[in-house]
């Protein structure tokens, strides 16, 4: 499989200020990246926004060993190009390259702090506006929360507590507060990681959307906002979040065709 961009096609997403995306995906971990690749491949104009480009597709383990990605997933296809014990940084670079050369996909470094939905009125369709720490708002017809363990994430290593979803990866505190102000009920969760290669074990404590807030993937308090992956109660394994990403991509693609 080649990662070179096609010279015969113009990328669909050529964003300018005020650009309207079909789907905005918040979070470029495994779930968000898989979803964005599938949606762009189905012809949608996709924004994939991450707080740091160096954190795209980061794993909790130092290598791919035991990751068990579904072989039919987009990320599974990428992982198959590497040795089973390839380090996670090599996988990150391969995935980031794939995202950046995919037509119709805009990989953007920015911090989403607020999420607001404008209801449809007359001939004006419903829009989701994403406020950012940097200032400019981002606009899409639909938005997907794929923020993993980063809603109010707190990293505990020994007696040290850091505001992060993983070491050196900043938590989504502003976004968690904004969701709570919108009436979204968030509940506490935690994940432990064993010490490897001399590094100490650690625990991440974070918030997830309560099961009562979800109708399938859709966040019930909004009409065009969805949630996927570890920020939901069911996103507890790599395999599960990638399978759910495939299911949500199919749902959003079918919905988009129905509105065309």
Image: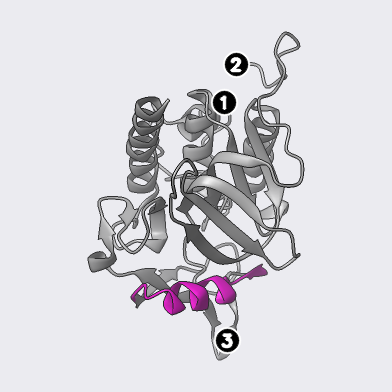
- Pointer 2 residue: 1
Residue mark closest to the camera, 1 vs 2: 2
Q: Residue at x 51, y 58 (%)?
A: 60
Of the residues under marks 3 and 1, which one precedes in the sequence?
1
Please state the horizontal and vertical placement of residue 130, each as a whole percent of the image: 59, 59
Real-space Cα distance between discs 3 and 1? Answer: 37 Å
Q: Is residue 218 left or right of residue 12?
A: left
Query: Label 2: few (<14), some or many (≥20) within 10 Å?
Result: few
Where is residue 21 drawn, in percent x and y? Answer: 59, 40
Q: Examine the rendered structure and indicate whether residue 161 appears above or below residue 40.
A: below
Q: Is-magenta flag for residue 180?
A: yes
Residue 18 visible from this viewpoint: yes
**Which mark sits nearer the N-terminus, 1 or 2?**
2
Give the CA distance from mark 1 to mark 2: 9 Å
Q: Mark on residue 81?
A: 1
Q: Is 106 left or right of 63, judged from the image as shown?
A: right
Residue 85 figure quarter: top right
CA gap between label 3 and label 2 equals 43 Å
The C terminus sits in image quarter: top left
Marks 1,2: beta carbons within 8 A: yes
- SS for tag 3? strand
**Front residue of 198 and 126:** 126
Which region of the structure is painted magenta?
Answer: 168-185
Q: Percent x, y for residue 176?
A: 49, 74
**Is residue 235 positioned above or below 155 on the image?**
above
Instruction: Specify few, some or many for label 1: CA neighbours under 10 Å numbering under 14, 14-19, or 20 or more.
Output: few
SS state under label 1: loop
* Residue in the foreground of this view, choosing between 205 and 40: 40
Q: Residue at x 43, y 74 (%)?
A: 182
Q: Tell me, for residue 161, which label it has, or none.
A: 3
Q: Is residue 90 visible?
A: no
Nearest the viewer among 254 and 37 is: 254
């Amino acid at each position: 499989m080649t990662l070179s961009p096609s010279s015969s096609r113009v990328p669909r997403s050529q964003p300018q200020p005020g650009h309207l995306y079909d789907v905005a995906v918040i979070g470029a971990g495994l779930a968000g990246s898989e979803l964005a690749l599938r949606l762009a491949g189905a012809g949608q104009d996709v924004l994939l926004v991450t707080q740091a480009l160096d954190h795209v597709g980061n794993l909790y383990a130092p290598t791919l060993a035991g990751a068990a990605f579904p072989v039919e997933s987009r990320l599974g296809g990428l992982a198959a190009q590497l040795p089973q014990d390839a380090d996670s940084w090599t996988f990150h670079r391969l995935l980031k390259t794939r995202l950046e050369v995919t037509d119709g996909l805009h990989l953007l470094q920015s911090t989403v702090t607020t999420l607001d939905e404008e209801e449809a009125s007359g001939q004006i369709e419903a829009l989701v506006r994403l406020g950012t720490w940097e200032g400019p708002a981002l606009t899409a017809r639909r938005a997907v929360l794929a923020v993993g363990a980063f809603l109010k994430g707190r990293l505990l290593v020994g007696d040290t507590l850091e505001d992060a979803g993983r070491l050196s990866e900043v938590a989504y505190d502003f976004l968690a507060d904004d969701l709570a102000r919108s009436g979204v009920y968030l509940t506490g969760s935690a994940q432990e990681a064993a010490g490897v290669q001399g590094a100490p074990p650690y625990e991440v404590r974070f918030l997830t959307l309560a099961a009562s807030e979800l109708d399938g993937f859709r966040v019930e308090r909004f009409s065009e906002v969805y949630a996927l992956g570890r920020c939901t109660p069911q996103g507890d394994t790599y395999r599960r979040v990638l399978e759910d990403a495939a299911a949500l991509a199919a749902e959003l693609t079918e919905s988009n065709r129905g509105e065309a």
